[in-house]
Amino acid sequence: MSTLSPYLPAPGFVVHAGNYQTTAGLSLRGHCAGAAAAQHLEQAVAEVLGYHQPFVWADCQRLASVSWHGQRAIFDAHQRARLAGTSLHWCGLTPPVLAQLADTGLHLLLSLLPTASYRGPGALLQEAVPKALYTRTFGM
């Protein structure tokens, strides 16, 4: 069974969450700025952790920026995954986003991998993520 859920918290930021067979993943796109975007990122992470997979893969190659709200959500995601016994891997972070994470030291806590290391649902890597039978939309 495959599920894909787009989270639409605010203009400029989208999170797609998916689960396919033995893999779960996220695709972060746009600018994760503000409390609403961070809250929806946290909801997406909670959903994929609920799939109880040993690994969750976050495709970040389309993530343009992350505010301190977003960084807090990323840190919380890291902590929740760790407590759940799940390895959360952040793949394909762009140089500007890596610089933002480095400014706060958050990059030191996370499992950061290149885009090629992503092993989550392949549909999440597509420019336009296809709608699946089980799709939910969150946000404004």
Image: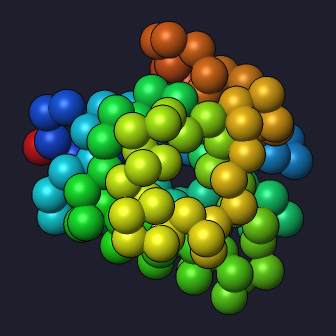
- Placement of the N terminus among the 4 image quadrants: top right
| The furthest residue to the bottom | 83
Percent across and percent down for residue 11 are 14, 33
Q: How many marks?
A: 0
Percent across and percent down for residue 98 are 48, 48
Percent across and percent down for residue 42 are 40, 65
Which residue occupies 39% across, 38% down?
Answer: 96
Image side of residue 79 versus residue 66, left or right: right
| Residue 2 visible here | no
Which residue occupies 62% across, 35% down?
Answer: 92
Q: How is the image coloured?
A: rainbow
Percent across and percent down for residue 26 are 57, 44
Image side of residue 124 versus residue 67, left or right: right
| The furthest residue to the top | 127
Q: Is residue 59 above or below residue 87?
A: above
- Placement of the C terminus among the 4 image quadrants: top left
Quarter where residue 85 is shown: bottom right
Quarter where residue 70 is shown: bottom left
- Could you say which is closer to the camera, residue 101 or residue 35? 101
- Could you say which is closer to the camera, residue 120 or residue 2? 120
Which residue occupies 60% across, 58% down?
Answer: 48
Image side of residue 51 versus residue 39, left or right: right
Quarter where residue 110 is shown: bottom right
| Residue 12 visible here | yes
Q: Is residue 41 above or below residue 68?
A: above
Q: Is residue 61 above or below residue 25?
A: above
